[in-house]
Image (spheres, rainbow, N blue to C red):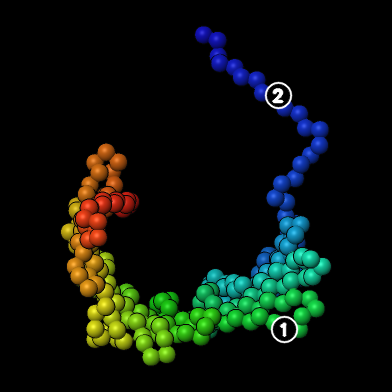
Amino acid sequence: MEPDRKTFQWSHTTPKSNNHKDVSYPTSDIGSSYDTDISFSVGVYDGLTQSTLTNKKDFIDENTPAVFYNMSIVTTFSYGGKTYTHTTDYTYDEPRRWTSPIATKVTKEESGNTNKYVVNTSQTYNDYGSITSAVDVLGVTTTYTYDATSHLLVGVSKPISATQTQYTEYVRDAVHGNVTTIRVREGNVTGAILQETITENYDAFGNTLQTRVKRMQRTTLPFKQNTKQQHLILEHTQQNKHRGHRCKWCCFNDH
């Protein structure tokens, strides 16, 4: 039998360049030194935007891997006769060698304009690398609480106004640590329950078979197994009080 042969022909008269980027190393590169602390930068130019990433290498010793930090990113582009510069500066907990920033400062500048737009955010971490508090761009502080034994998240407290705080409680099963109940409370862990979501009735594969959402009234959301497509379908039927008919909607719960 003759082999199946296919012939392809093409020709290029003019080379084309797509998504071209120029990469440079303005000060140094990552491999310029082995056993010393260094700072090095990487420049990336895509034809429209020039970005410069400044990095820091912290050499510990020959038996400990070096730690690398991205200290800043400066992006510059021009539009409408003006030059715009966006600078992001990062601060780290270097004594603990965390490579996730504990503070971020974003500065936006426009040529010919002395006003700058500056935004600061920050995070604190525990010894297990989990965030214990975070300050957003509005200066609002969200705190996170963890179980003393499993170190899994059990509560999140976030102010939603000058006088109100929303506390979200996470209840987990003792065996696997999976979240079984989420309660939104007023104020703190002992405050009034505003909403409660209970996940229950798991199948043999760990899929949720039913979720109960409690607000002013109880709502049960059952899941049905679709054996042909191998996923769960959430089917929920609601009664329209004004028109007297029922509507049915479903969504997928893929795993």
Q: Are marks 2 and 1 in contact (CB under 8 Å)?
A: no
* Mark 2, secondary structure of its residue: loop
Point 73% across, 62% down: residue: 49
SS assignment at label 1: strand
Measured as percent of width and height from the top left, residue 67 is found at: 57, 73
Residue holding disc 1: 115
Q: Foreground: 175 or 94? A: 175
Location of residue 25 in the rendering, given as x and y in whole percent from the top left corner: 75, 65
Identify the mark at residue 254; answer none if there is no mark: none
What's the amino acid at mark 1?
Asn
| Residue to which mark 2 is pinned | 9
Could you say which is closer to the camera, residue 34 or residue 209?
A: 209
Upstream in sequence: badge 2 or badge 1: 2
**Residue shown at 74% from the left, 71% from the top:** 84
Q: Is residue 85 visible?
A: yes
Circle 1 Cα neighbour tier, 10 Å, few/some/many (<14 / 14–19 / ≥20): few
